[in-house]
Amino acid sequence: MYKTSAAFRYLTATGVALLTTSLSLAAAGEDPRTIVDRVYSVAQAERGEARFKTSCSSCHSLSTFSGGAFADRWYGQTMAEVFEFVSNAMPENNPGGLKKEEYADVLAYILSINAYPVGTDDLPTDPAELKKLAIAPNPK
Ligand code: HEC
């Protein structure tokens, strides 16, 4: 009898601890944002288009990054991973050769050709900020 209730108390305590943990995780997670939430500007996408033409289009056609291909390739990751990959590995003939802002511009352009909603602020270059932007398919 005593054993049973001790086990019960233990389980209850564990349950409360787990609940507390998940509540605090939810609070720490801030607002979960995705690339659907107006994360780049028109001006930035326009700069990115020009940059794409000079630095990327010799090897990539736009179709590589549009029509859902971008979201399919990167789904489940964040803009931080995309930024890190592109800024370390691209252009393949000059890896890391662009400025951070220019990489962000090109990524904004890629979001624009996928018709992600546009906002007023530029896509950031700070990895901690980019990490908050999950890649989600465009619901449109
Ligand atoms: C000299 C050729 C070349 C240039 C220029 C180049 N790339 Fe690439 N890129 C490649 C190759 C080859 C791959 C495939 C390698 C891989 O996936 O690891 C690739 C892969 C990628 C990928 C990952 C695959 C995907 O479909 O998402 C992205 C994103 C990318 N490039 C973006 C860019 C951007 C942005 C630029 C311009 C700043 C650029 N590349 C310029 C050759 C190039």
Image: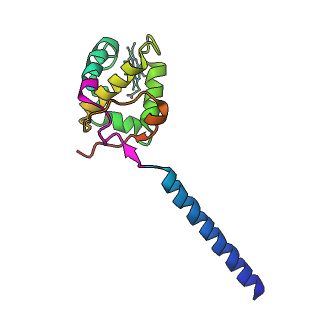
Q: Is residue 44 left or right of residue 20?
A: left
Report the coloring of the rendering. rainbow
Q: In the rendered picture of this protein, how many numbered marks are placed on residues?
A: 0
- Quarter of the image where one finds residue 113: top left
Say if 60 sits above or below 32 in the image: above
Q: Is residue 41 magenta?
A: yes
Q: State the image quarter where residue 78 is shown.
A: top left
The x and y percentages for residue 118 are 25, 35
**Which is more toward the observer, 69 or 138?**
138
Q: Is residue 3 above or below residue 81?
A: below
Residue closer to the observer: 31 or 54: 31
User: Looking at the image, which residue is at 24% across and 22% down?
Assistant: 46
Residue occupying the point 45% across, 49% down: 30
Q: Which residues are magenta?
A: 31-44
Q: What is the x, y in percent for residue 27?
A: 49, 55
Q: Main secondary structure of the magenta part?
A: loop
